Image: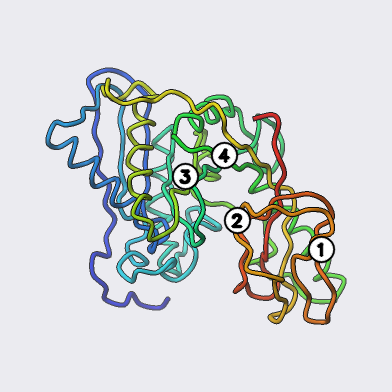
Amino acid sequence: MSELTPEPALNFKSISYTGLAPGPRVIILGAVHGNETCGTRAILRVVDDLDHGRLNVVGGRVTFVPTTNPLAYARGEREGERNLNRNLGPTEHPVEFEDRVANWLCPLLAQHEVLLDLHSFQAHNEPFVMIGPLDNSGDLQPFALAGPERALARHLGVRRCVDGWLGTYALGVERRIRQTLAAGRTPDATSEDPRYGVGTTEYMRSVGGYALTLECGQHSDPAAPEVAYQAIRRTLSCLGMMSAPALAHDAVADIEALSLYEVIDKQHADDSFSRPWGSFDRLAKGDLIGTRQDGTPVVAAGDAVILFPDAKAKAGREWFYLARANPDF
């Protein structure tokens, strides 16, 4: 982007409340993607509750960002100039609008210890939470706070959780690089660099915090803002930051836990699905998932769950992910 096109409300806004007692530093984001407004609506509702005394922060500090990507939000679109939730990090020479968002957002995230990022999705499915890796000292995403992160995930009020995002994304990158080099082409940074799998939660973990992405429901589902609202209250109550005795914040006992383990790319624009798949659809071994442009069938190698199917994916990008049950959650 050479110049900023005049748009309404192209500024960055955060709202913070600090209790009298010590406590954690929590940040809650809405509208990282501009067409996902349930988080924005829930945040503004909680802010109104706090301003009028219906809720009270008794300890710690909570920061709300109602519209994380104001350009995308003003346009009512997922992205302003690129996906803010990919390759997130400060940059010395910002080019796209999302680079400017990152230069403001990343230092703000680093001032906090816990992130709740509120999203919605295209398909009609029930809400779910995405969590990070187990504790590890590896190179990709070292982490030491899996315990509290997973404990908080159980208190958000949803019955599904998914882990394994960045590791699976990185495996897909490795495969793309091998295929690109074998074909004598130069790797494309936007699809063949594992950093492009880094979004808000991955960045938060990289600066010493822990983080959850809550997918609150379908974009236009009138229940999604309520899911987001209750999740905010549950988060603050679970962490001892809010006095809300009427709020039931017991852990959800029967969560369906899934781990991503494979990503399949679209190889040609004319690759097609065998039917309109939705996230969490079940696959049995041998099921026909789709067909390549040259007629090659894409079949399930074993029982699995399909996630994030994208019929409109571009060639060389993620077409769908596969997951299986995670008995260790």
Q: Is residue 196 visible?
A: no
Can residue 252 be seen? yes
Disc 4 element? loop
Disc 3 residue type? Leu
Q: Nearer the viewer, residue 151 or 203?
A: 151
- Whichever of labels 3 and 1 marks the residue nearer the N terminus, that label is 3
Please tell me which of labels 1 and 2 falls first in the chain: 2
Nearer to us: label 3 or label 1: 1
> Label 3 belongs to which residue?
214
Within 10 angstroms of label 3, few (less than 14), some, or many (20 or more) residues?
many
Give the distance between the C-alpha atoms of the residues marked 3 and 4, in whole angstroms. 9 Å
Q: Pointer 1: what residue?
A: 299
Q: Which mark, residue 232?
A: none
Query: Residue 67 placed where, x, y %?
Result: 32, 55
- Residue indicated by mark 2: 279
- Residue 131 badge: 4
Q: Nearer the viewer, residue 283 or 327?
A: 283
Other-residue count near label 1 (Cα within 10 Å), few / some / many at <14 / 14–19 / ≥20: some
Query: How far is the residue under mark 3 from the one under mark 1?
Result: 30 Å
Amino acid on which the number 2 mark rests in the picture: Ser
Q: Nearer the viewer, mark 4 or mark 1?
A: 1
> Mark 1 or mark 4, which is nearer the start of the sequence?
4
> Separation of disc 4 and disc 1 at Cα?
28 Å
Residue depicted at 47% across the width and 64% down the height: 93
Compared to residue 129, the image places residue 186 above or below, namely: below
Q: Quadrant of the C terminus?
A: top right
User: Which image quarter: residue 274?
Assistant: bottom right
Callout 4 amino acid: Ile
Left or right: 245 in relation to 32? left
